[in-house]
Amino acid sequence: MSDCIFCKIAAGEIPADKLYEDDEVVAFWDLDPQAPKHFLVIPKSHLRDSSALSEEDAALIGRIIRIGAHLAKENGLDDYRFVVNNGASAGQTVFHFHLHVLGGRVMGWPPG
Ligand code: AMP
Ligand code: ZN
C-alpha cells in the first residue's frame, strides 16, 4: 500500500533500526518505546490487522511469533510481552499488522 509507513519500511524506502529481515518478515526497534526493549515484527506484505488474515497467512503469522520469540531471547529477554492491537479503540495507530515485543521491565495486568 503506497501510503503505509510499514510497507515503506519493509521496502527500504524509509529507514528503520532493523534487528532482522528476510524475504517475508522484518523486525525493527519501535520509535517510541514503551519498555526498555520494544521492537516490532511485521510481514512485508500489507495486512491491515488480525481480521484481514486468511488461512494462507497462518504460516506467516506463526513465523512472526517464532521470530519475535527468537529475537527476544537474542536481546536478553527471558520474559516479555507480545501485543497485537486491532482497531483504533484497542490502540492500533498503524494499520499494517505488527507484533509488539516488549520487555526489560515488570509488566502490569490488566493492560491499560
Ligand atoms: P500500534 O499503536 O499498535 O499501531 O503500534 C504502532 C507502533 O509503531 C507504535 O508503537 C509506534 O511508536 C511505532 N512506529 C510508528 N512509526 C514508526 C517508525 N517509523 N519506526 C518505528 N516505529 C514506529
Ligand atoms: Zn502496509
Image (cartoon, grey):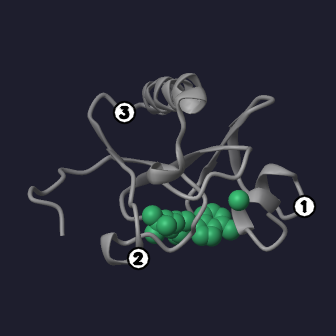
User: Residue 35: x and y, percent?
Assistant: 36, 58
Q: Nearer the viewer, mark 3 or mark 2?
A: 2
User: Residue 94: x and y, percent?
Assistant: 57, 69
Q: Nearer the viewer, mark 2 or mark 1?
A: 2
Instruction: Name the residue beneath numbered marker 3.
Output: 77
Q: Residues within 10 Å of mark 1 (few under 14, many from 20)?
A: few
User: Residue 80: x and y, percent?
Assistant: 30, 39
**Foreground residue among 11 and 36:** 11
Q: Residues within 10 Å of mark 3 (few under 14, many from 20)?
A: some
The amino acid sitting under disc 3 is: Leu
Instruction: Name the residue beneath numbered marker 1.
Output: 13
The amino acid sitting under disc 1 is: Glu
Mark positioned earlier in the residue sequence (2 or 1): 1
In the rendering, which numbered label is found on residue 88?
Answer: 2
Mark positioned earlier in the residue sequence (1 or 3): 1
Q: Residues within 10 Å of mark 2 (few under 14, many from 20)?
A: few
Query: For numbered disc 1, what is the local secondary structure?
Result: loop
In the rendering, which numbered label is found on residue 57?
Answer: none
Is the N terminus in the top left, top right, bottom left or bottom right quadrant? bottom right
The CA span between labels 1 and 3 is 30 Å
Query: For numbered disc 3, what is the local secondary structure?
Result: loop
- For the question of whether residue 101 can be seen, the reply is yes
- Direction from residue 87 to residue 30 in the image, left or right: right
Mark positioned earlier in the residue sequence (3 or 2): 3
**Dot 1 and dot 3 residues touching (CB under 8 Å):** no
- Direction from residue 83 to residue 98 in the image, left or right: right
The picture quadrant for ligand 1 comes to: bottom right
Which of the 4 image quarters holds residue 22? top right
